[in-house]
Image: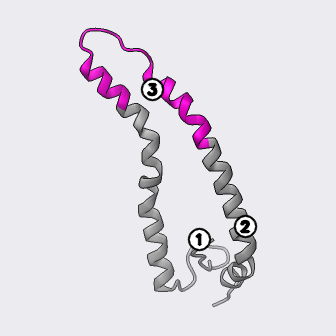
Amino acid sequence: MLAPMAMSSGTMQPNRPRGVTVVEQIVFALLVPVAVAPTTIPLAIEMLVGLLREGGGSPPIYLILTILELPAVWWIYRKALTFQGSLLGLRERQILEVVTKTA
């Protein structure tokens, strides 16, 4: 929605993309790991506890922390959907102009 790109009909090839649009999409792709990284924190904690506790089984820390993380993810998801919906409503005409542009 922030960097729409026209596509040639019948293919998945971009139709003469602008340089700014390409750079924006590369930046967004590079930010995906930063957005997903917090979901790996429970696994890292369980691995750290497993390394520190020698010889004994540890409780299922990953499961417990993931269940505790679920409401936060649900809340962020709802807020993101609301934001994206309002953004789409504001930029709908501009997006349609870019996407339906013919060569």
Q: Residues within 10 Å of mark 1 (few under 14, many from 20)?
A: few
Amino acid under disc 2: Ser
Disc number for residue 12: 1
Establish if 55 lies above or below 63: above
Residue 87 found in image quarter: bottom right
Q: Residue at x 71, y 58 (%)?
A: 82
Q: Over which residues does the magenta segment extend?
A: 45-73
Establish if 33 lies above or below 67: below
The span from disc 2 to disc 1 (Cα, nearest Å) is: 27 Å
Of tags 3 and 1, which is closer to the observer?
Answer: 3
From the image, tell me which residue sits under label 3: 62
Establish if 40 lies above or below 28: above
Amino acid under disc 1: Met
Q: Residue at x 67, y 79 (%)?
A: 99
Left or right of residue 44: residue 22: right
The verdict on residue 61 being magenta is yes
Left or right of residue 71: residue 88: right
The span from disc 3 to disc 1 (Cα, nearest Å) is: 40 Å
N-term mark: 3 or 1: 1
Amino acid under disc 3: Tyr
